[in-house]
Amino acid sequence: DYGRYDLTQLRFKKDRLIDDNLYCRGDGTLVYFFEMEELEKLLAEHDMQKQAMHVDRRLIVNRAKQVKMYRQWIQGKFVKSGGEE
């Protein structure tokens, strides 16, 4: 999932903001930007247990345009409570 303050979130215009960290893309689809604690709590409420979780931060450079892009995603592995890996 997208991490909070990902470049994509920072590029959204104010008129695209629907609610805290919830935005509407130009094609009408919605995108939400999570914090790790928020995502972990949400999954725990649905009986999911965290096996692993981290923020993947990357600097991506478009060499043709000389543009630096700071990206971040939350990656995790969760299992249903009582379930096996």
Image: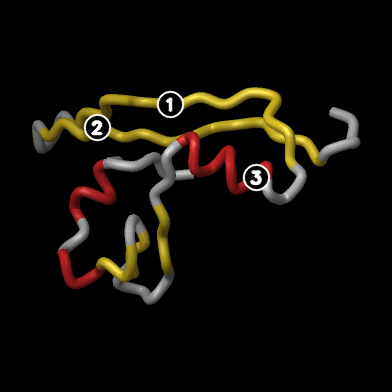
At horizontal 33% and vertical 66% (from top left) the residue drawn is 19
Gap in Å between the C-alphas at discs 2 and 3?
A: 26 Å
Q: Residues within 10 Å of mark 1 (few under 14, many from 20)?
A: few
- Residue 71, placed above or below residue 47: above
Q: Report helix, strand or loop for mark 2.
A: strand
At horizontal 39% and vertical 49% (from top left) the residue drawn is 33
The residue wearing badge 1 is 56
Nearest to N terminus: mark 2 or mark 3: 3
Q: Report helix, strand or loop for mark 1.
A: strand
Nearest to N terminus: mark 2 or mark 1: 1
Q: Position of residue 72 (x, y in %)?
A: 36, 34
Label for residue 70?
2
The residue wearing badge 3 is 43
At horizontal 73% and vertical 34% (from top left) the residue drawn is 49
Q: Residues within 10 Å of mark 3 (few under 14, many from 20)?
A: some
Q: Report helix, strand or loop for mark 3.
A: helix
Kind of residue at badge 1: Asp
Kind of residue at badge 2: Tyr
Kind of residue at badge 3: Leu
Gap in Å between the C-alphas at discs 2 and 1?
A: 11 Å
- What colour scheme was applied to this rendering of the protein? secondary structure
Between 72 and 46, which is closer to the camera in this rendering? 46
Place residue 71 in its image quadrant: top left
Between 19 and 61, which is closer to the camera in this rendering? 19
- Residue 84, placed above or below residue 5: above
Q: Is residue 81 left or right of residue 9?
A: right
Do the CB atoms of the residues marked 1 and 3 lie less than 8 Å apart? Answer: no
Q: Residues within 10 Å of mark 2 (few under 14, many from 20)?
A: some
Label for residue 78?
none
At horizontal 16% and vertical 65% (from top left) the residue drawn is 14
Between 47 and 25, which is closer to the camera in this rendering? 47
